[in-house]
Image (tube, helix red, strand yellow):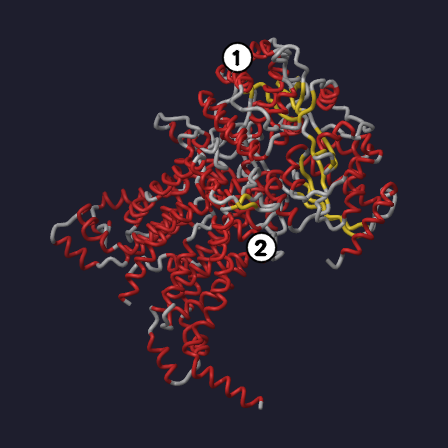
Amino acid sequence: MSVTTETDQRGWWRRNQMRAAPWLFLAPGIAFFALYVIFPIFQSFQISLYRWDGLGEARYIGMRNYHELLDDPAFYTSLRNNVKWLLLYLLAIPGGLFIALFLNQQVRGIRLYKSLFFFPFVISQVVVGLVFAWFYNPSIGLFNPLIGLFGLGPMNVLGNPNTVTYGIIAAGLWPQIAYCMILYLTGLNAVDPEQVEAARLDGAKGWRMLWYVILPQLRPATFIAVVVTVIGALRSFDMISVMTNGGPFGSSRVLAYYMFEVSLSEYGFRMGYGAAIAVVLFLIMLVYIAFFLWRMWREERGY
Amino acid sequence: MFPTPVERRSNAVQTTYKALLPLALILWLMPLLMVALFSIKPDSDFTQGNLWGWPSSFVGFENYTRVFTDSAMPRYLLNSVFITVPTVIGAVALSCMTGFALGVYRFRSNIWIFFMFVAGNFVPFQILMVPVRDLTLNLGLYDTRLGLVLFHIAFQTGFCTLFMRNFIRALPRELIEAARVEGVSEIRIFWYVVLPLMRPAIAALSVLIFTFIWNDYFWAVVLTQGVETQPVTAGITAFNSQFRAAYHMMSAGSIIAALPPVMMFFLMQKHFIAGLTLGAVK
Amino acid sequence: MQFSFKSVAVALAASTMLAGAAQAELTGDLRIFFNDQNPAPKEAMEGMVERFQEMHPDLNIELTLIDREANKTQIRNYLTANAPDVNGWYAGNRMRPYVNAGLFEDVSDLWDGPMGEELASTRPALTLDGKQWGVPYSYYQWGIYYRQDIYEELGLTPATTWDEEKANCQVILDSGRKCYTIGTRFLWTAGGWFDYLNLRTHGYDFHMALTAGEVEWTDERVRETFANWRELIDMGAFIDDHTAYTWQEAQPFMVNGEAVSYLMGNFVVAPMREAGLTDDQLGFYQFPEITPGIPKAEDAPTDTLHIPAQAQNKDNARAFLQYVASAENQTIVNQTLGQLPINRNAEVADDKFIQAGFEMLSNATGGIAQFFDRDADAELASAAMEGFQEFMVMPDNLDAILTRLERVRQRINEN
């Protein structure tokens, strides 16, 4: 009897494996992803409607956390800084392209140069943050003597509310430029040499060549560079945490940091309020996610 | 090739270019070089204001040895290994399967499941912070390496699935079709036909995930505490408060903390860049 | 709840044995999370554990040292999951969130015994809602540490009044130095300045009412405090770029003689000595009088140990806390820490600064405050200290800062 069930089962598997197999392979991945990523997103939406110190009982307060956000100067500072991050972080793309063009040669040792230019990206942001914090430090850093050579400064970059965010973004650009550089170097490898030669025969040079012949061919690299840079900009947390803790007096906060600060930092006990900030950040990001998915969907149709 | 190869230019241009290269590199790595210099200086150089000059004595060896003997740094490094390696294995294993399922089979919800992974991968992870911390607390996994590993596996699965699925799509379908015609079961097709072909993708993804997870700071702070469990990114802040204002030690500590992914990169450069630039060329 | 019967039995046994607990042989485990890795506190804590271990050889003690700053965020996690048997924290309102959430054990029973009388002076700091929630192990004075040698060189003597303080400062500034070093990167150092300026301008009762959220931040009296602060800021009395430094990074300015004094807690003495300042160079004086006739109150933060409500070995923990507070242990520990013992039968170390602090606090007729972020609600403390830092850089923003703080106060009071 046991023999017949086994063949029955095997028979069932034979007949249905094309339909069952994908789900079998997907099950563990989906389970993990749902538990740790998808459900928590909805939970955050729910928590944002509560007042909760993370220790005791949560109390439902409807949209009050969101109302409070509208009147919270720190929220607007964070939002403004997020915009600065978004815009200035995009400089990594031309920056990376510039270095990629500079290094796209075949002299001796160039491979090592490419690697060394790239490796800031491999270092953790925590260490990059520390390194730059010391670099900017008004009493031990190399930054002030350096700008002193040009008759500028001295500046207290991270201690001044007007410069602090730019200082951190500059530090963040360092690995990000390296990332974009490697994307472009790979892209440049794939540029069609015949097209370049043909354009050269037509008399295209320098900027015109770059703009009309090279850049169109680099579009996939540019697209990926934009996507990773935007996401990197909106996620910026490590550097702010390590370099300034959001200071001085909160002037370098971004949403990602502010939400951590109100919910889990030294004096933060407002899980609901933090969740509300996270929801806002999520909605901003959703625009980009939608854009990315839309583009992918268009490509998939062609598949 | 663009820009015009220098070897086609005049000698003057070639020489300038070759001189410019090291100069640009030094400028580019300036902040890092400063820290490297700090790390081999003695404490007295800092109190006497000899910050960027020639070290009055080379004590690099002593400084780096002290990082290992006088602090919890070795423990943090070990924690990082115990967090990173299982995550890499777990995330790659899961995504080989999900990538296979989404890359090979055509079924109606395929694209939506794929989009779910992709979208989840781009989510600002702060929105997950409070619920995931709670979940981990409730599972009794708070402040364990396992708790951190499980979350990392789950979150990385999004990116890895995207990666693997695209890779599998680019494989020749004829092989799979041929195996099916011969009546090979789907599981065997996965194991014996597709998996061997995925080796380069597995290598690239492993190196990439290793770097991402090793460098994670946010989740380490949210889900772990203390010497027993925290990886080196979080440990470096404790290390720094132990050696507060001792810049030579903090510099040496930072360099050690940053080293493993750097080594990984230089050893596995080809795979690393292949992983990173997937999709940058079409 | 399989362990409920056992724990009731243990609790009964513990309560009947309490008086003799110190003598009784303890067995089982004792897990301690101590919140300081700096050399002196580390040595003090390890010493305590070692002596306690000698008294109870069969007890398995496990000591974990957590970074002071890291502990401030981690405490809520380990109290709710993975609770130790004893953990380090601070007195005053800083205990409130954990007391309200039921995460700290009520240890009033310890205070009801003879220990309570010996520790009488710190009882208020450990009391919330009429119960005691922990045991102190040390406290320390705040005040102005200064370079005696530079004062002598300039012919100055420590000020006792506000006018003298400003006059001294002017002489120091004219000599090309800064009057005060400070590092406000972690904000709380500015809280120390506010505490003293407010305590001296309006006295203890007003200060406590303000930190408790009972006074409006836009009140004219609050502005008076800031006006006094502003006099120093406008003189250029504080070092430049203080927002970029931690309190430790601000120290070299005083060691190098670029700045002459430092409003700080007594824990600053150890690193100053380590950096090479001798006791002839380093002096201490009480923060001078501002409004004449107001009794002087002081900041004297109390560092404490608590038993988490979820601790597994509460009877061992109680015995340990009793030992910590005992006169014998207090003498040794605070000798190592360079701080003041909380047990009145303990001996005060024969150290210039500890003695000065002891005398000052014994005569503090105005009252003893904990510290701004221990007296005020966590959320208010964070917003206010941020405001203090902003004020020190941009004093013209005062109106905006106070309006903002008032809004925070109102929202907290609504809850």
Look at the image and tell me whether residue C178 can be seen: no
Is C302 or C351 nearer to us in this picture?
Answer: C302
> Which quadrant of the view contains residue B66?
top right
* Amino acid bearing label 2: Thr
Outermost residue on the left side: it is: A202
Q: Chain of mark 2?
A: B
The residue positioned 30% from the left and 64% from the top of the image is A300
Q: Is residue C90 left or right of residue A200?
A: right
The vertical placement of A294 against A19, above or below, is above
Q: Quadrant of the N terminus of chain C?
A: bottom right
Element under disc 2: helix
The vertical placement of B177 against A97, above or below, is below
Q: Chain of mark 1?
A: C
Q: Is residue C188 left or right of residue C284?
A: left
Residue B218 drawn at (x, y percent): 51, 48
Residue A76 drawn at (x, y percent): 41, 36
Q: Which residue is label 1 attached to?
A: C175
* Amino acid bearing label 1: Ser
Q: Which residue is label 2 attached to?
A: B136
The vertical placement of B136 against C275, above or below, is below
Is A288 or A205 nearer to us in this picture?
Answer: A288
